[in-house]
Amino acid sequence: MATSLDQLAYDLSLRALNQQENLLNELRARTGMLLAATAVAASLIGGRILDGDSSIIDVLAMAPALVTLLLSVYVLAPKGHLTFAIDAPAAYEYFMENRIELPEAERDLAYWNREVWEENQIVIDGMIRLFRWACYALVGAVLAWSLVLGLQ
């Protein structure tokens, strides 16, 4: 339990970073499931295309699946510019050099954590948008394949 406002702010900033990291992990888990579903769906129609019994509609039905695959792989790819912790030795050296006491250090760390959170959130928001587009593309692929099957 926090004993000062500075400590409370620091604890809350750490919690926000932890929640953000959990959100990223959940997004990647969902994207992995989306990628697996796309692979299964693509294998069903892809087999028809490889057999040579395909029409232009079959080939066009693969396009949304390919979009889903590409977007999913991008979301799953490592992002080196995401940070969920501050470099502890660097923070220690900074506070020691500037003779900063613990309450002020906790306050500074809370602001630093917020800056890191904001930088991360820009990247994560972009990943969420791409995930949504990947979901839409998979729905488009399934609808296109349903149309192909319905026309036969």
Image (cartoon, rainbow, N blue to C red):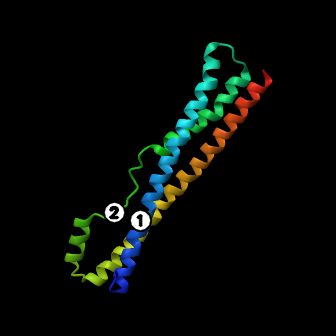
Residue 42, horizontal then vertical, whole percent:
60, 29
- Tag 2's secondary structure? loop
Q: Earlier in the sequence, mark 2 or mark 1?
A: 1
Could you tell me which quadrant the N terminus lies in? bottom left
Q: Left or right of 95: which side holds 5?
A: right
Identified by mark 2, the residue type is: Ala
> Which image quarter holds the C terminus?
top right
Tag 1: Cα neighbours inside 10 Å, few (<14), some, or many (≥20)?
many
Q: Secondary structure at mark 1?
A: helix
Q: Nearer the viewer, residue 52 or 114?
A: 52
Position of 31 with respect to 64 (left or right) is left
Q: Position of residue 75 (x, y in %)?
A: 50, 46
Distance from disc 2 to disc 1, alpha carbons, whole Å, reads 8 Å
Q: Is residue 66 above or below residue 71?
A: above
Left or right: 119 with respect to 106? right
Q: Position of residue 136 (x, y in %)?
A: 66, 44
Q: Which residue is mark 2?
A: 85
Q: Residue at x 46, y 44 (%)?
A: 76
At a point 20% along the width and 76% down the height, the residue shown is 96
Residue farthest toward the top in the current orientation of the protein: 52
Instruction: Decide: is 16 above or below 33.
Output: below
Q: State which quadrant residue 150 falls in.
A: top right
